[in-house]
Image: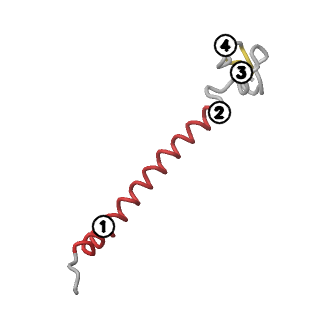
Amino acid sequence: MPLVPCRACGHQVDTSAEACPGCGATNPGHKMSRQQRDLIALVVQFVIGTAVLFIAGNMAWNAVGPIIKQQINKPANG
């Protein structure tokens, strides 16, 4: 297996190593740690979820808003 520098300390490690013998970093042959990948995935999910909620709320308001305004402005028969 080829040797690559550890992403944390630069020590030469095997690409299949579970931990760096120099600093103990997990998956030292990968450019990003699992925690960093998980954080990026969480941020992407949050942004997409927020966009979906905003679009759905906007569509619901555009569908129901005129009806509500019409009911508010309707003169009372009495």
Q: CA distance from mark 1 to mark 3?
A: 63 Å
Q: Residue at the spot x=55%, y=37% of the render? A: 40
| Residue with the mark numbered 1 | 65
What's the coloring here?
Answer: secondary structure
In what element is the residue under mark 4? loop
Q: Position of residue 31 (x, y in %)?
A: 61, 25
Does label 4 or label 1 sit earlier along the sequence? 4
4 or 3: mark nearer the eye: 4
**Tag 1: amino acid:** Gly
- Give the mark count: 4
Q: CA distance from mark 2 to mark 3?
A: 24 Å
| Residue with the mark numbered 2 | 35
| Residue with the mark numbered 3 | 2
Does label 2 or label 4 sit earlier along the sequence? 4
Q: Position of residue 74 (x, y in %)?
A: 22, 77
**Residue 64: which quarter of the image?**
bottom left
**Residue 17: which quarter of the image?**
top right
Query: Which dot marks residue 10?
Result: 4
In what element is the residue under mark 1? helix
Quadrant of the frame with the C terminus: bottom left
Does label 1 or label 3 sit earlier along the sequence? 3
**Tag 4: amino acid:** Gly
Q: Residue at the spot x=74%, y=18% of the render? A: 13
Q: Position of residue 36 (x, y in %)?
A: 61, 32
2 or 1: mark nearer the eye: 1
Q: CA distance from mark 2 to mark 4?
A: 19 Å
**Disc 2 crowd, CA 10 A, few/some/many (<14, 14-19, 20+):** few
**Tag 3: amino acid:** Pro
**Tag 2: amino acid:** Gln
Q: CA distance from mark 4 to mark 3?
A: 15 Å
Q: Position of residue 11 (x, y in %)?
A: 71, 12
